[in-house]
Amino acid sequence: MRFLPLTAALLASALMSGCGSGISLDEPIEGPIWQLEQLGSELIEPSSDPRRNPQIQFERGSGRVSGTGGCNRVTGTYERNGSMLRLRQLGATRMACPNEASTINETQFFAALQATASYRLQGGSKLSLLDANGRTVATLSNGSAR
């Protein structure tokens, strides 16, 4: 019976630390601009024109998300609770992309945003968007090195 308080304290500590997952649930994704690096397992080459790089930004306090697929702007809302992340009411402009590859990447990026069910933040500079089965649908970077 002496060990009960110690055991309870250790259990509480493990639960609060994210069970060793490496995810800090208190580390926000809001603020920085997240640039797309990878869709599923396919690496995305950055454009020579930074305005053509797919990216998103989560706005603090407003619950809004905005960004671009490289050609078209996207906006919507998001809900984040722990590692759960849902993007909703996504809408995009409908301008023509300069080439077929850009169109395909943009379509896949927007689909990945809609499929997002949770996320994993790695070192504060890499954001992995995960679908309901835990598969990585997109990996983004905010350019900061930590």
Image: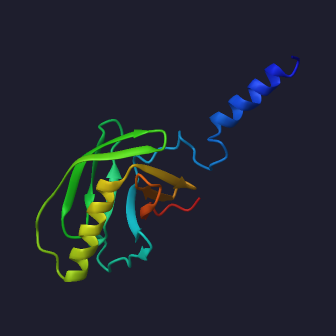
Residue found 31% across the figure and 70% down from its top: 53
The image position of residue 20, as x and y in percent, is 67, 46
When asked about the image quadrant of residue 109, the answer is bottom left
The residue positioned 37% from the left and 76% from the top of the image is 46
Q: Is residue 75 left or right of residue 140?
A: left
User: Where residue 139 appears, x then y in whole percent?
Assistant: 44, 64
Placement of the N terminus among the 4 image quadrants:
top right
The x and y percentages for residue 69 are 25, 66
Q: Residue furthest right?
A: 2
Name the side, left or right, on which 30 lies relative to 96: right
Left or right, 12 with reference to 84:
right
> Which color scheme did the rendering employ for the protein?
rainbow
Q: Is residue 120 left or right of residue 113?
A: right
Look at the picture and state if 56 lies above or below 17.
below
**Looking at the image, which residue is at 41% across and 69% down?**
40
Residue at the far left in the pictured view: 95
Using the rendered view, name the quadrant where residue 63 is placed: top left
The image shows a total of numbered marks equal to: 0
Q: Locate residue 31, reporting x and y percent.
A: 39, 48
Q: Nearer the viewer, residue 73 or 25?
A: 25
Q: Is residue 30 above or below residue 49?
A: above
Residues 45 and 31: in front is: 45
